[in-house]
Image: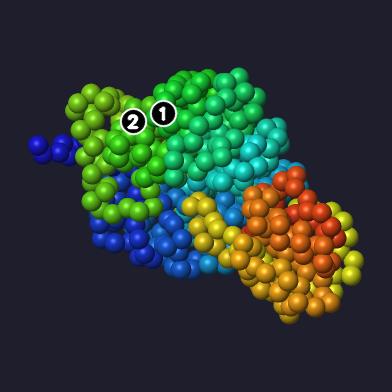
Amino acid sequence: MAIDPALRRLALRTLLAAFPGTAAPDWALALLDEGLAGHTLFGGNVADRDQVAGLTAELRRARADVLIAIDEEGGDVTRLAHRTGSPYPGNAALGAVDDVDLTRSVYAAIGADLAAAGVNLNLAPTVDVNTADDNPIIGTRSFGADPARVARHAAAAVAGLQGVGVAACAKHFPGHGATIADSHLELPTVDAPLAVLRERDLPPFAAVVSAGVQAVMTAHIRVPDLTGDGPATFSRAAVTDLLRHEYGFGGAVVTDALEMRGAAGAAGGIGRAAVRALAAGADLLCVGAEVDHALVEAVAAEIVAGVRDGRLAAARLEEAAERTAALAAWAKSGDGIAPVDTDLGYAAARRAVRVEGSLAGLTGPLVVQLASGHSIAEGRVPWGLQPHLNGTEQITVVAADASPEALVDRAGDRPIVVVGRHHHRAPAARTLIEWLAAARPVVVVEMGWPSTWRPAGVRAFVTTYGASRANGRAAAVALGLAVG
């Protein structure tokens, strides 16, 4: 059966696609002309800022009101600076400083960078309240574990971004901070009563709605008391009843990537996930990062089929397309907005550094960086002290494979600085650090989510609340090891 062109165009108007490479393929441009809402840019689309500006200009020539989205959170999640690390600290550092004016300024600077590059929708800020120390996907992306603190910084971040004409998208509703699983890989469950969510997870979303946020992103998490057996993305009770009606949100509801196992796995494919998300009340559907022409067409065709077979009301699809168009109409191209001095990011990161113990006598140490993995949200981005060191020797080791005796021999009479992320999660890292601390003067630098673990015998424990380039420079300065 031939696809109805009017329905296909409506379906395309609800989709946020993506494409590989640093130039837009013909199909990606043609779909914009046919109604596609827009594209999300990922690290693979970014060579440098001038190239991104040229790419976004090309997309905008295909259709002036295209939505061009990106995950630019600052801190550990960056796309514009994925080759070097972000020049801004992330939310955990800003929450630790707890200066809402600073948060607003940092997000305004991020927004200015995006606007100058032609991006008009930032899939940020993350406003989850990170209450699980072992959360594998949120962590330093969160402003903290206190709902009130997260709420006030979430509102400030939205004000900063939108004040320079870049639409903000607060995520991940109704709150991904209490999970110990990654929704990219499975469907996490938050088994908490709705009353707990209202006190712990939902206050930041109420704050961003009050601040006029243009978009809110749903989480692919299951909250049985709210969403039943499926994820929030497919839950009318979560999206329509709670977010729309109770909290009064009138902007665009955006889904997290539908290719994620928490969505596609729960629905039996990306197309079916799209239909279920729209039926629940979502407006703009992030297809994912691994996208080609055939996938976009298949998702659009499934949406049309959903209208025909009754899974999705035509009026709901029309409403979603209208909300997405309203978001695009609000968003500005950012022409003429210049990036700000990135020393703002370093200054903010420096204020976040916390030192427990003494750094006295830390002269010419051996810096040992413990290799760590990365989440799918973060991607492989450089981190650590190396770019900022003043000639100090650094080596990188895998904690489970490292010989503590060999490290002590290499250090000689020098102190040792151990740098890593999420030390508390890795038994091998904890064991190695405590062995070294019993043999040599040791300072630990924690660049991941902080925990209550403190190793016995160390001279000092330094917390940066993130691993961005700005955080690395701030730590090197605090240790007295920075260039200049």
Q: Which three-letter amino acid code belongs to the residue tagged 2?
A: Arg
Please tell me in which quadrant of the rendered image residue 390 appears: bottom right
Name the side, left or right, on which 116 lies relative to 33. Answer: right
C-alpha span from label 2 to label 1? 10 Å
Does residue 226 show up? yes
Badge nearest the viewer, 2 or 1:
1
Picture residue at 31% right of the left edge, 41% below the top: 270
Q: Position of residue 461 (x, y in %)?
A: 80, 56
Q: Nearer the viewer, residue 138 or 127?
A: 138
Please tell me in which quadrant of the rendered image residue 42 appears: bottom left
Q: Position of residue 133 (x, y in %)?
A: 65, 42
Q: Position of residue 99 (x, y in %)?
A: 75, 45
Does residue 163 show up? no
Name the side, left or right, on which 438 lies relative to 312. Answer: right
Tags 2 and 1 touching, CB below 8 Å: yes
Q: Count the numbered circles shown.
A: 2
Q: Which three-letter amino acid code belongs to the residue tagged 1?
A: Gly
Q: Position of residue 216 (x, y in %)?
A: 50, 36
Which quarter of the rendering shows the C terminus? bottom right
Determine the secondary structure under disc 2: helix
For disc 1, the neighbor class at 10 Å (few under 14, some 14 to 19, many from 20) is: many
Q: Is residue 54 above or below residue 37?
A: below
Picture residue at 54% right of the left edge, 23% below the top: 247
Residue lying at the far left in this picture: please name it. 1
Name the side, left or right, on which 119 lies relative to 14. Answer: right
Q: Which mark is residue 276?
A: 2
Picture residue at 85% right of the left edge, 60% below the top: 459
Q: What residue is shown with label 1?
A: 230
Q: Is residue 3 above or below residue 344?
A: above
Determine the secondary structure under disc 1: loop
Name the side, left or right, on which 295 lies relative to 188. Answer: left
Q: Nearer the viewer, residue 59 or 91?
A: 91
